[in-house]
Amino acid sequence: AMSQEFEPRILAICCQWCSYAAADLAVAMRLEYPSAVRILRVPCTGRVDGLRLLKPFEEGADGVFLSGCLLDDCHYRTGNYKATKRVAYAKGILQQLGIEPERLEMFYNSSAMGPQFAQTCRDFTARIQELGPLFDQPSQSAAA
Ligand code: FES
């Protein structure tokens, strides 16, 4: 049977030092991770401002997550702590807008954590699938 399951659009903002390398490793290890996850590489999660966390939702993302180095392993020392605070702040804004704050999350993966990164992608995708599309999709009943 053909799956009618909703395919969420997800943006993963990954720090180049750890999580982006973990994503690379996941690919190299041929670990399955959902194709719906688009990866954006940044120098450090601490460089991502609040607006950049919220903008993707406006541009059609159903979920966004930041993936940084493990706490205390950030190459810029406290970037991931800053990012954690910004994610919490941005979640508050989402809530005020009537959007589930669970659509935004912060994760930590070292460069050796390819399998964990793949798992993060699968778990987050499942979470967003459960929440459903952020905005109502155009009716597909005509195609049914
Ligand atoms: Fe990776 Fe800062 S360098 S989170």
Image (spheres, rainbow, N blue to C red):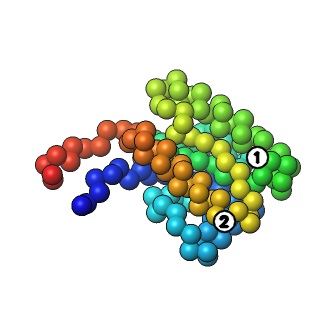
Closer-to-camera residue (86/125): 125
- With 122 as the anchor, is 132 left or right in this view? left
The residue at the point 54 percent across, 33 percent down is 101
The residue that label 2 is drawn on is: 114
- With 140 as the anchor, is 117 left or right in this view? right
Q: How crowded is mark 2: few (under 14 residues within 10 Å), some or many (20 or more)?
A: many
Q: Is residue 135 above or below residue 75?
A: above
Q: In this view, does 103 lie above or below 120?
A: above
Closer-to-camera residue (38/108): 108
Disc 1 under 8 Å from ligand 1? The reply is yes
Q: Can residue 124 be seen in this view?
A: yes
Asked which secondary structure carries label 2, the reply is: helix
The quadrant in which residue 91 appears is top right
Kindly indicate whether the residue at mark 1 contacts the one at mark 2 (C-beta within 8 angstroms). no
- With 103 as the anchor, is 69 left or right in this view? right
Closer-to-camera residue (38/31): 31
The residue that label 1 is drawn on is: 80
Asked which secondary structure carries label 1, the reply is: helix
The residue at the point 56 percent across, 40 percent down is 104
> Disc 1 marks which amino acid?
Asn
The residue at the point 76 percent across, 46 percent down is 80
Q: Residues within 10 Å of mark 1 (few under 14, many from 20)?
A: many
User: In the image, residue 128 lies at what x, y percent?
Assistant: 46, 44
